[in-house]
Image (cartoon, helix red, strand yellow):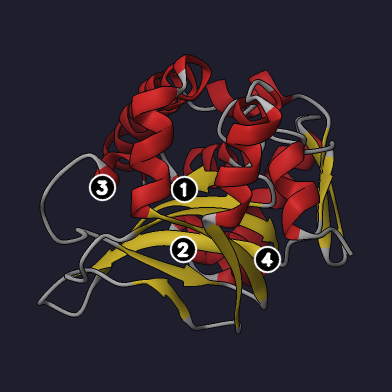
Amino acid sequence: MISLEQMLRRTSWAQALSPEDFARAHEGSIERLVPGGGFVCRKGEPVDHWYGVIEGLAKMSSDWATGKTASYTGIASGGWFGEGSMLKAEARRYDVIALRDTRVACMKGDTFHWLLDHSIPFNRFIINQINERLGLFIGLLESERLADVDARVARAIGALFHPVLQPGMESRIAISQEEIGYLAGVSRQRVNRSLRTLQEAGFLTAEYGGVTVLDLEGLRRFGG
C-alpha cells in the first residue's frame, strides 16, 4: 500500500522541491479515508484544503435543485484537484464523491499558499494543471452537448488517463460499469452497450471489473 509520503514524492511538483520545502509540504498534508459514497468535499463548504487521490476513485459533480446531477469528471489515483477553488475567496462550487473507498491526501490551505509564494516549480505545476483542466472541461462540455452516448462514455474513460491530470496511470484501470456510468451520466446497462461498441472499434478491451485502453487518442476523438 502506497503511503502519503510516497504519493507526494511521485508528483512532479514535489520532485522539484528542495528537501526543506518538501518536508514543509509533507508536514502540511494529512491522509483521510473516504468510504464509497462519501464526500471528499461538498458544494458550499469553505475551501481549506487542496486534494489528491492516493488510492481509489472519486467523481467531481454538482447536484441541481431539480434533483438532477451534473457529472464533470473522475479523479483517479495520482490526480490532484481543487487548485482553482484554492485561488478564489468563495465557497466550493461542486461536490467530490468517492465512488469506492478512497484514500485522499489533504494539503492545508496555508501550506498550499506558502508553496505558491515560494516555489516556482509549484507555480508552474498549478498553472499547467488549471490550463489542462480547462481544456478537459471544454472537451467534456462539447461531448455532453453535441456527442452521442457512446462518445460520452469514451471521453469519460479517456479523461481518467489524462497524462497531466492523472499522471502515472497505466493502460488498465480497475473500474466497474456502474462507476463508468456515474462518470458519464448514463445507466450501467447503457455503458455495457457503449463498451461493446468501443471494443469492436479497437479502442479498448472491457473485462470484468476493469478496462484496458488500447487507443487513448482514439477514445478522446471518438464521435468528434
Determine which residue is flagged by label 3: 85
Q: Nearer the viewer, residue 19 or 199?
A: 19
Specify the farthest residue to the front: 20
Residue at the image position 46 percent from the left and 63 percent from the top: 186
Work out whether residue 14 or residue 199 is closer to the camera in this orientation and state it.
Answer: 14
Mark 1 — residue? 149
Check disc 4 and give the amino acid type. Answer: Gln
Determine whether label 3 and label 4 are within 8 Å by CB: no
Secondary structure, mark 1, is helix
Q: Position of residue 65 (x, y in %)?
A: 10, 76
Q: CA distance from mark 1 to mark 4?
A: 14 Å
- Contact, CB < 8 Å: mark 4 with mark 2? no
The location of residue 111, given as percent across then percent down, is 42, 47
**Residue at x 49%, y 83% (from the top left corner):** 38
Residue named by callout 2? 186
Question: Is residue 4 depicted above or below 129 in this figure?
Answer: below
Which quadrant of the rendered structure holds the N terminus?
A: bottom right
Can you say whether 91 is above or below 52 in the image? Answer: below
Q: Is residue 139 visible?
A: no
Q: Amino acid at mark 1?
A: Val
Front one among 90 and 174: 90
Question: What element does badge 2 sit on?
Answer: loop
Q: Amino acid at mark 3?
A: Ser
Decide which of tag 1 and tag 4 comes sooner along the chain: 1
Q: CA distance from mark 3 to mark 1?
A: 30 Å
At 54% from the left and 21% from the top, the residue drawn is 221
| Residue found at x 62% / y 50% | 26
Looking at the rendered image, the disc whose residue lies closer to the viewer, 3 or 4, is 3
In the image, which disc is placed on residue 177?
4
